[in-house]
Every structure is written in structure tokens, then in C-alpha cells.
Image (tube, helix red, strand yellow):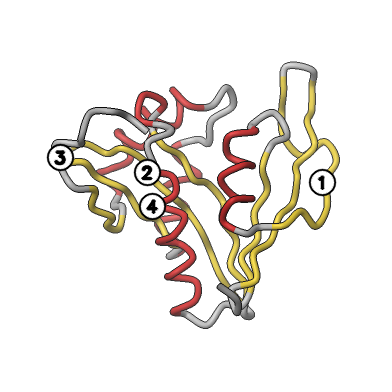
Amino acid sequence: MSAEPRATTPVIRALAEEDLDAVMTIEESAYPWPWTRGIFSECLRVGYGCQGLWLGEELAGYVIFNWGAGESHLLNLCIRPDLQRQGLGGLLLEHVIGRARAIGCVTLFLEVRPSNPGAAALYERRGFRVIGRRPAYYRSDEGREDAIVMELDLTRD
């Protein structure tokens, strides 16, 4: 966590099409193989949970998730690289967990890269457990990288 207090309180609100320039700036700065603008636009169009975390007028991060049949899937959670490790990812994660529970989901799934230990640690601290791997799921410098599949039982806490 930063020793300096934040000047503004984080606010989480739904993303809109007009937010996608800011989303893409963060996505492209955070990932070597970012989602495309089209993917984000389609997530908005079909009604996925698309939420942004704002510090004043600035987008600090976002999360995309979907749900159905009592399950939710965290598809993308990203914090602007210069604001990481300040608890903002945890705020977005808690927001998704609360939303998933509110709509009746009992399990939240996600995939994380083994090469992203910070994200994996965030999920483990929150109670996610590893349930498997998806071979060659992500692009990587070496060609492909497995995904670690994790789940959180939303009926506990």
C-alpha cells in the first residue's frame, strides 16, 4: 500500500461505451496480449457485468464478469499498473463477489496466469482455491501458457 493517502474515495460504477478509450489505455499498459476494444464492446452489448473503479474523474481499473445457472465467471480484472498494490484490485473483487451473491450465484470461477503471482495471491487471500488447469490457454512469449482455474464458494464467508 502507498504511504500517501488517496486524494479521492474510489467509486465503482457501470462502464459505458464512452469509457472504452480509458479502458483500452489501461488494458494495453497492463497486458502484453490485451483484449481488443471489440471484446469490451461486446461485453457491454450483451449485458455482462462491466464495472469501472474511478478515482475522481480518472478510471483506475475495471472488472468484467458474467453469470448464469448459479455460477459467475470473473473474466477480466485490471488495475492501472501505477496504482497496483494499493488495495484497489481487492475492492473490485469484493464488488464482484457481492454482485454475484446478490443475483443468486453460489460459485465464482476465474482463470489466472501462473506468470501473474500477484493476482493469484489476491485470489488465494480471498479464499479462492485451485481446481484445475487449462493447458495452453493464454498466449505467451514462449507460445502458450496454462491457466490456473480457481473457484470461490459464495455460500461461505
Question: In front: mark 2 or mark 1?
Answer: 2
**Mark sitting on residue 91:** 4
Amino acid type of the residue that numbered disc 1 sits on in the rendered structure: Arg
**Does dot 3 land on a helix, a strand or a loop?**
loop
Give how far apart the Cα atoms at labels 2 and 1 are.
27 Å
Residue lying at 23% horizontally and 28% vertically, measured from the top left: 4
Q: Disc 4 or 3, which lies upstream in sequence?
A: 3
Circle 2 crowding by C-alpha within 10 Å: few under 14, some 14–19, many from 20:
many
Q: In what quadrant of the picture does the C terminus appear?
A: bottom right
Q: Tell me if mark 4 has few (under 14), some (14-19) or many (20+) residues whose alpha carbon lies within 10 angstroms of its own.
A: some
Nearest to the eye among marks 4 and 1: give it: 4
Q: Which mark is residue 88?
A: 2
Reading the image, the residue beneath label 3 is 57
Q: How far apart are labels 2 and 3 at the CA level?
A: 16 Å
User: Label 3 is placed on what type of residue?
Assistant: Glu
Q: Which residue is mark 1?
A: 134
Name the residue: 48% across, 26% down: 30
Secondary structure beneath dot 1 equals: strand
